[in-house]
Amino acid sequence: FVHSYNVANDNKDDCVATTDYGIDYTSVAGNGRVFGVQFHPEKSQVHGLRLLDNFAHLR
């Protein structure tokens, strides 16, 4: 994360993962079939590609 933008997440139930970058903030949010990330998984090499593959195969 090289910027100061982050999700203002008022519903903590939607928080899937956080990142500690001086403060804790939501880096992955999800609700039902909606899933959003605060990073570019395609730039995260093997782990990011696995995340995208897992997401593509959700049912």
Image: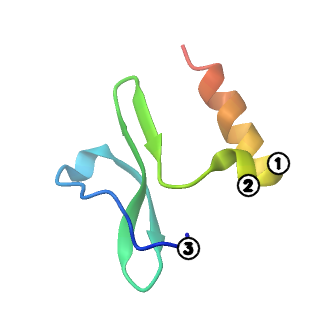
Q: Amino acid at mark 2?
A: Ser
Q: Amino acid at mark 3?
A: Val
Q: Amino acid at mark 1?
A: Val
Q: Residue 2: which numbered mark, if any?
A: 3
Mark in front: 3 vs 2: 3
> Which image quarter: residue 56?
top right
Q: Secondary structure at mark 3?
A: loop
Neighbour class for label 2 at 10 Å: few (<14), some, many (≥20)?
Answer: few
**Mark 3 or mark 1, earlier in chain:** 3
Residue tagged 2: 44
Residue tagged 1: 46
Q: Total label count?
A: 3
Q: Is residue 12 left or right of residue 34?
A: left
The residue that appears at 44% across and 41% down in the rendered structure is: 36
Task: Please say if the residues under marks 3 and 2 sit with CB atoms less than 8 Å apart.
Answer: no
Q: 49 or 32: nearer the eye?
A: 49
